[in-house]
Amino acid sequence: MDEAHRQGAGGGTPGTSRLLTSLIGPGVVIRGTIKDSDDTLTIRGRVEGSIENEKRVVIDEQGSIKAEIKAKEIQVRGKVTGNLHGEERVRIAASGNVEGDIQTRRFAVEEGARMKGRVIMTSEMTSEKAPAVKAEPTPLAKAEKTPSSESPSGKGPKQVTQPSDSKVATKSATTRSEK
């Protein structure tokens, strides 16, 4: 955007600029894709689809979003259903409600905020276009039935054992005997 468009009404002082803000008001409903390059996109209305901004997206308390949001910084004060991709930061205010996964370098959530989903923290070295890595839960050691694991009556478990790692046990025993 050229300098003339960044200056305020009346031309402003040459060489100075002010931040541009786009606003989607409380009575507005948008279905589709929003791509905005202003400094801040503030949403007080409803959006269904996807939102992209080069800098900052603010979902105000009146805002209701069903969309994937991508921006450098995302701040949620309203309700969002969808994934958030904040290149630098995602912040959920006390009045915020998010249902979806969050991928960001820095994450803040205020007391009272609601969230249902995963948070994937990316490193400074990670490219913004890098695919999200799905975090799968690591299963606990599975119980194994042993020949004596059935009770004499056959109506329930008598004994359950967990597999042991003999290398770890041997190594720790060796370490203790060397001292």
Image (cartoon, grey):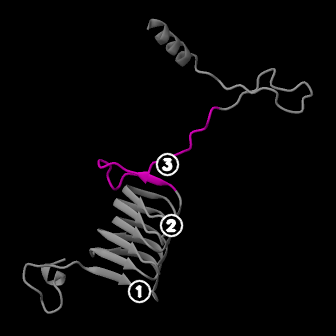
Percent across and percent down for residue 80 are 49, 70
Residue where numbered disc 1 is placed: 25
Sequence order check: which comes first, mark 2 or mark 3? 2
The three-letter code of the residue at mark 2 reads: Gly
Residue where numbered disc 3 is placed: 134
From the viewer's side, name the closer residue of 1 and 58.
Answer: 58
Q: CA distance from mark 1 to mark 2?
A: 25 Å
Highlighted magenta segment, given as a residue range: 118-141
Percent across and percent down for residue 170 are 54, 12
- Mark 2 vs mark 3: give the one in front: 2
Crowding at mark 2 (Cα within 10 Å: few <14, some 14-19, many 20+)? few
Percent across and percent down for residue 56 are 32, 70
Q: Which mark is residue 112?
A: 2
173 up-or-down from 128: above or below: above
The three-letter code of the residue at mark 1 reads: Gly
The prevailing secondary structure element of the residues shown in magenta is loop
**Badge 2 element:** loop
User: Is there a contact, CB below 8 Å, between mark 1 and mark 3?
Assistant: no
Snapshot quadrant of residue 71: bottom left
**Badge 3 element:** loop
- Mark 1 vs mark 3: give the one in front: 1
55 up-or-down from 22: above or below: above
Sequence order check: which comes first, mark 1 or mark 3? 1
The three-letter code of the residue at mark 3 reads: Lys
**Badge 1 element:** loop
Q: Name the residue located 78 percent from the left edge and 26 percent from the top edge.
A: 159
Residue 134 is one of the magenta-drawn residues:
yes
Percent across and percent down for residue 115 are 52, 63
User: Is there a contact, CB below 8 Å, between mark 2 and mark 3?
Assistant: no
